[in-house]
Amino acid sequence: MNLLSLFKRKPKYQDAAFLDLAMMLAGDDDDPTYKRELLTPAKLDFSVESLRHVDEYLEALHKEPPADQDLMRAVLRCGAYVGEVIRRNSKVEYHWLDFNEAARQSKLVKDFGMSLGTAGVLAEGPERMCFPLGKICKYIENGSEDSVYFFARTALEQLPELP
C-alpha cells in the first residue's frame, strides 16, 4: 500500500443533490420550473428517448428565455435531468461533482471558471467529464443545434477506452 494513497482525498460526490434537482424538473409544485406546463411528467422516464421531450421544452425556452431565478432553476433542473439520463444509461460510472471539486481534479474545469454551466460537472474521473448544465445554457442561447438528445447519445456512444 502506498503511504501517499492514505492522504489522497476522495472526491465528494453530489449525486443525491443532482438527482433531487432532476426530480424537480416537472415535480416541484411549491417552486415550479419555468414553463413547466410544457413538460409531460410521464415522458420524463430517464430514458435517452425522453431527451427528445426535453429538447422540445428547451426550444420553447430558446424562443422565450427565462431570466434570473427562472433561468437558474431551469438550467439546474434540466441539466441535472440530462446528466441523470447519462448516468443511468452509461457503461461507465459517472458521478456529479460541484465546480470546486471538479476544478481540483481538472485544470480544464478550473480554467473554464465557475458559472451556471459549470456549477455541476458529470465525471467518471479527471480525464472524462461532461457539462450537462453548460449544454442547457447553450441550447437556450443557440437553439436546436445544441440538442440535449444528441449530446447524450454522443456521450453514451463515444466512450473511448482510457489508457
Image (cartoon, grey):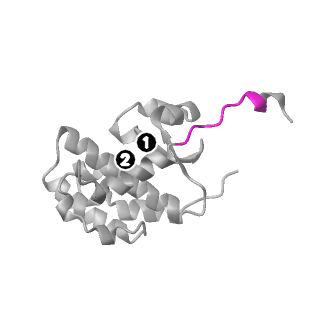
Residue 23 coordinates in the image, percent (x, y)? 37, 56
Give the labeled residue for mark 2.
133
In the rendered image, the residue lying farthest to the left is 64
Taking the image as shown, residue 155 lies to the left or right of residue 62, namely: right
Kindly check if marks 2 and 1 are in contact, taking CB atoms under 8 A apart as contact.
yes
Q: Position of residue 97 (x, y in %)?
A: 50, 41
**Vertical order, 140 against 59 (above or below):** above
Q: Is residue 52 above or below residue 6?
A: below
Tell me: 128 left or right of 46: right
Label 2 neighbour load within 10 Å: few <14, some 14-19, many 20+? many
Give the residue type that dot 2 points to.
Leu
Asked which secondary structure carries label 1, the reply is: strand
Give the residue at mark 1: 120
Q: Earlier in the sequence, mark 2 or mark 1?
A: 1
Q: What is the secondary structure assignment of the residue under circle 2?
A: helix
| Magenta residues, dominant SS class | loop
Q: Is residue 54 left or right of residue 45?
A: left
Q: Position of residue 35 (x, y in %)?
A: 17, 56
Q: Residues within 10 Å of mark 1 (few under 14, many from 20)?
A: many
Q: Position of residue 1 (x, y in %)?
A: 86, 36
Taking the image as shown, residue 4 lies to the left or right of residue 27, namely right
* Residue at image coords 43%, 69%: 47
* Residue 154 appears in the figure: yes
Q: Residue at x 65, y 57 (%)?
A: 161
- The amino acid type found where label 1 is placed reads Gly
Residue 148, compared with residue 120, is above or below; it is below
Please state the total of marks drawn on the protein image.
2
Q: Which residues are magenta?
A: 5-13
Using the numbered discs, state the Cα–Cα distance from disc 2 to disc 1 in whole angstroms.
7 Å
